[in-house]
Image (cartoon, rainbow, N blue to C red):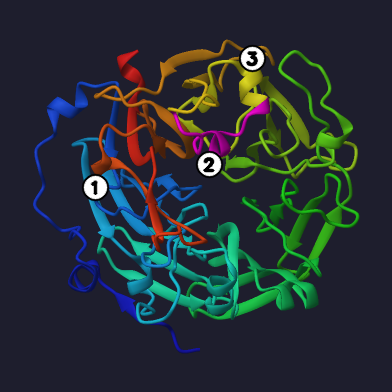
Amino acid sequence: MKLKSILTAAAAVLVLGACCNNAPKEEPDTEAMKHKVYSISMNKICKEWDGQWQGMAVASDGNCYFGSSTHAKSHGAGFHKFDPRTYKHTMIVEDMTYLCGEQDLPFQQGKIHSPIVECDGWLYFCTHLSNYWKEGIEAYPGAHVFGYEMATGEFRDFGIVKERYSIYSAIGVDPVLKKLYVFSVPFVPELYQNDGCHLMSIDIATGEKKDCGKVVDGRLGASFWFFVDKDSNLWFTLWKRNYSYENDFGNLYCYNPEADSIKIYDNVLPKGQLIDGTPVSEARNEQRAWTWLSPFPGRDKCYFIQGTLGGGDERLWIFDPSKDIVSGEAFEPVAYIGSSYFETAVGGDRLYFCQYEDLEDARTIFSEDEREIDPDSPAYVDRKIHLRSISLTDEGEHREIKDHGALIDQDGRQALMIMSMAADNDGHVFVYGSWRPKSFKEATLQYLLFEYPNGDLYRLLKRGEFFAVINTNED
């Protein structure tokens, strides 16, 4: 099968105006490193970037790689690198639409709304459509899967995985079979009503794409995380907050590549509890799904949560596929942590997570909705987001939760929403989200679905997008 072209980062610089990876090494920014929370404005680079969901990872080279996403019809997603040893930020790609060679078409590759996974020195991630309204959905040709070689700065475009289908949003890599897996989702009504969501695989060596089976029939769907275990089995759940499925009220799915089939374990995910042990409502239990996970280094197990928008459970869990799934033996509760979502990460021997200061706020208020409230309106309530963590080596479900403090940066900006997070083994936690800006230069320019009476298509919001690093060693 003919492969898509491989682009170098230097070539991407010429096309996109991005920064070259091979720039001379800079001295550490010691002034920036003095701050416990240090942020970098993304909207000073691109006004249309308005959020980031997933799409962040600490790689084996020690750098944090992350995306920056948008809903605009005029600009696509960015791809970045941050070096915690020097505090140097590098914009690798400013607009993924150009890297796809689709800059002259009437749509944008607006998001990197997938995990970033690593294999053999390459990072892999997916694009996702930008504008969710009718014209954007109908024009969208499909999501791409990209590889990025860290040592050389080369990109490899595996192309559109399934024509007119986006990827929403899981990607997984099997380092043994050298395969990628993605969750392919149609947003055009005629496609999801007459077809549905598919699990797709890509052979890394040849680029060959394979349909591994339809998972959702006759409707939209979503799956945010994949766990590829040491035996090459692919495990996943379906997100239920915005979608409903027949006969899925807590199912676990497993694709076995040898049998080339998907096995469904009905209603086996753990029932939810609050941090004090109170069971969550049955309606919330019907929404059970993995809303974050992290594989163990040997891929024999993984950590997972079913927190905010995933059933409301407030515990960290371990899934061990070698144990009995139907009886529940495969699911081991680790510790009560309170409600959490994408803003969760393993770093060294700790689990980090972001929450509102008040745990009741954390379980009842979704920060992505809260960030849209005008801070000058009577409806606005000042709710600070805190970074917290627990030890993964301690024992007992009621472990000490360490509060690292509110997310307030070097200039007094306050975090409003965090939806991407990663951590390294040296005490650095990396986040991307919406913060209260200090000036209009830092504010997001949001595309509007409907024009204002004066014909404007954009409005300047009272929030901005920032990447930030928290040095927990400064506690």
Q: Is residue 382 left or right of residue 248?
A: left
Residue 149: quarter of image: bottom left
- Earlier in the chain: of badge 1 and badge 3, it is 1
Q: Is residue 56 above or below residue 316?
A: below
User: In this orientation, which residue lies closer to the viewer: 130 or 475?
Assistant: 130
Contact (Cβ within 8 Å) of mark 1 with mark 3: no
**What residue is rendered at 43% in x and 27% in y?**
376
Callout 1: helix, strand or loop? loop
- Mark 2: secondary structure: loop
Q: Residues within 10 Å of mark 1 (few under 14, many from 20)?
A: some
Looking at the image, which residue is at 84% across and 56% down? 245
Q: Position of residue 475 (x, y in %)?
A: 35, 12
Query: Would residue 91 appear left or right of 376 to someone viewing this image?
Result: left
Label number found at residue 297 = 2
| Residue 370 drawn in magenta | yes
- Amino acid on which disc 2 is placed: Pro
Relative placement, left or right, of 96 versus 270 is: left
Q: Which kind of residue does numbered mark 1 sit on?
A: Lys
Q: Nearer the viewer, mark 1 or mark 3?
A: 1
Q: Magenta residues?
A: 364-375
**Distance from label 3 to label 2 (Cα)?**
20 Å
- Nearer the observer, 256 or 290: 290
Q: Which residue is mark 3?
A: 395
Q: Is residue 250 left or right of residue 92?
A: right
Q: Is residue 133 visible?
A: yes
Return the residue at label 1.
44
Q: Which mark is residue 287?
A: none
Query: What x and y, as percent, mark residue 429?
Result: 39, 31
Which mark is nearer the camera, 1 or 2?
1
